[in-house]
Image (tube, rainbow, N blue to C red):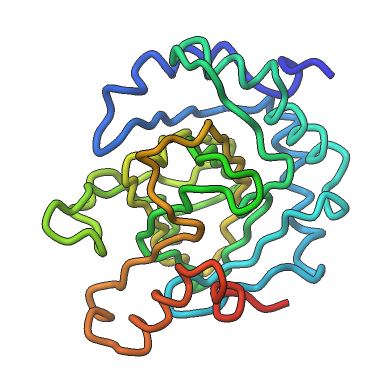
Amino acid sequence: MNLNSFINTKKFIKSLKNFSKKKPFPYVVIDNFLKKDIALKVKKNFQKLEDKKLWNYNNFCEVKKATDNWNFFSAETYQLLLNLNSENFLSNIRKPLKMKSLYPDYGLNGGGLHLMKDKGILNPHLDYVIHPKLNLVRKFNLIIFFNTNWKKSNGGELCLYEDNKTNKEIPGKQIVKIFPKFNRAVFFDTSLRSWHGVNKVNKNVRKSMAVYYLIDKTKKAEKRFKALYSPLKNQLRDKKVLKFIKLRSNLKTSSKVSKLK
């Protein structure tokens, strides 16, 4: 497979020149990340997914549907994911960022295709640090949007927050709000207490692909195997929400409270 027939790689590599300079943590936004014909074909895969048996997250902090099942992917989606996890693509990240190692996650743990319908939301959260099966550290997120005819009134922006220096359980100030434009990609570092979330979706279906990249584990790495969510302002004193967050962040109890088939 030819990587350049799927992805505008030169544009992606060029964007990484400013990666480390961004606040609140390193990130870049790349418009027209995919070749247009590929983006349109992958978009069609989401329409077929809506009738499938997806993971259904419907709780206090996350309302979305998702699948990491390769059998549900169209040929174009399957091939795109292979390219995004290929050595050729990973080398385009390693070289400009001067990294010694970087690994793919073919199992798409927590990644794959995500759908958020009306009232879908993701509270601000920190992603897992240590991959529960590979014993590697999560380093980067790559999110690609496949929404067409998206309006500001539809919400669903990806929000990035400062770290809170006085309370590690909640984020600091929101610094960035990224509109989920069609064929827009966001690449960001998740290893720096990188609080992020998704604003509530209104009267539309937000469609995205998520791919995660890993590095070798260090002694300083936090021992967090599941996402840590923060309550919203109106949830700060809600005991049910706080109990859910505690259970959701625990590897042994997370699946019992977070998702249903």
**Is 69 or 106 nearer to us in this picture?**
106
Q: Residue at x 74, y 18 (%)?
A: 3
Image location of residue 193, percent across then percent down: 32, 46
Q: Residue at x 23, y 51 (%)?
A: 174
Question: Which image quarter: residue 78?
Answer: top right
Q: Residue at x 24, y 34 (%)?
A: 23
Q: Residue at x 61, y 73 (%)?
A: 255
- In the displayed structure image, the side of residue 103 where residue 31 appears, left or right: left
Image location of residue 178, percent across then percent down: 38, 44
Looking at the rendered image, the quarter that the N terminus falls into is top right
**Is 11 or 215 nearer to us in this picture?**
215
Image location of residue 71, percent across then percent down: 88, 53
- In the displayed structure image, the side of residue 205 where residue 120 appears, left or right: left
Asked if residue 202 shows in the view, the reply is no
Single out the residue that lies furthest toward the bottom.
Answer: 239
**Is 97 or 44 nearer to us in this picture?**
97
Question: Which image quarter: residue 190?
Answer: top left
Tell me if residue 98 comes above or below residue 179 in the rendering. above
Instruction: Tally the marks.
Output: 0
Asked if residue 25 shows in the view, the reply is yes
Looking at the rendered image, the quarter that the C terminus falls into is bottom right
- In the displayed structure image, the side of residue 234 where residue 187 appears, left or right: right
Single out the residue that lies furthest toward the front.
Answer: 219
Image location of residue 177, percent across then percent down: 32, 47
